[in-house]
Image (spheres, rainbow, N blue to C red):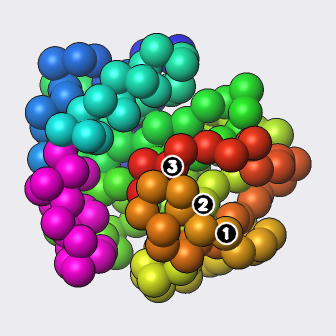
Amino acid sequence: MTGAVPVGPRVGFRDLVPADTDAVLDLWVAAWSAAMPMIDFEARREWFRDWLAQLRQEDFALRGAVEGKDGLDTDGPVIGFIALSPPLRYLDHIALKPDQWGSGLGAELLAEAKRLSPQGLVLDVNQANHRAVAFYEKQGFRRLRADRNPNSGLATWWYVWGQAEPPPRVASSK
């Protein structure tokens, strides 16, 4: 993948490494618990640890948004992350700390995903996650169709940006 990429005066991107796993898990639990409080994401922590390991084995790009004083100082804390497969053009995950919601970091994370997959992206989102649905539509994604998450049974939407198609059935992390 690529090294550090500055995106602004306070945030840079870098590849996530195994040592980041606990911080990413904490971020994931916090973000999802805030977005969908009716689900116990703390109880899913170990499942997500295994999911991240599987994504690494499948050569997904795992990129962290990291606070740094000049955008290149990537030793700071991970405040958001993306998990995507550029060959499949599939954005499996985007998450940021809830205290970063509305800060523009989500758009920066999505811009990083688009940089890594410039031909297009496809993603699925829980229909009940209205904030995320509005965010993707604001960022230029088009709704393709309704679906259902095979793990949770929750209703989802498939969204696309650019030239991309949903991969054959994926076991989503949502």
The residue depicted at 68 percent of the width and 46 percent of the height is 169
Amino acid identity at mark 3 = Ser
Q: Percent x, y for residue 85?
A: 61, 31
The residue depicted at 67 percent of the width and 69 percent of the height is 147
Viewport quadrant of the C terminus: bottom left
Q: Nearer the viewer, residue 167 or 151?
A: 151
Residue highlighted by disc 1: 147
The residues colored magenta run 27-45
Residue highlighted by disc 3: 172
Amino acid identity at mark 2 = Asp
* Most frequent secondary structure within the magenta stretch: helix
Q: Is residue 27 left or right of residue 116?
A: left
Q: Nearer the viewer, residue 141 or 14?
A: 141
Q: Indicate whether residue 41 is drawn in magenta.
A: yes
Q: Are marks 2 and 3 in contact (CB under 8 Å)?
A: yes
Where is residue 114, by image quadrant? top right
Q: Is residue 124 above or below residue 130?
A: above
Q: CA distance from mark 3 to mark 1?
A: 12 Å
Q: Are marks 2 and 1 in contact (CB under 8 Å)?
A: yes
Q: Is residue 20 above or below residue 115?
A: above
Q: Is residue 89 left or right of residue 93?
A: right
Q: Secondary structure at mark 1?
A: strand
Q: Secondary structure at mark 3?
A: loop
**Total numbered badges shown on the rendered structure:** 3
Q: Is residue 90 left or right of residue 32?
A: right
Circle 2 Cα neighbour tier, 10 Å, few/some/many (<14 / 14–19 / ≥20)? many
Q: Percent x, y for residue 124?
A: 60, 60
Residue 124 marker: 2
Q: Is residue 81 above or below residue 156?
A: above
Task: Please tell me whether mark 2 or mark 3 is closer to you in this view.
Answer: 3
Q: Is residue 92 visible?
A: yes
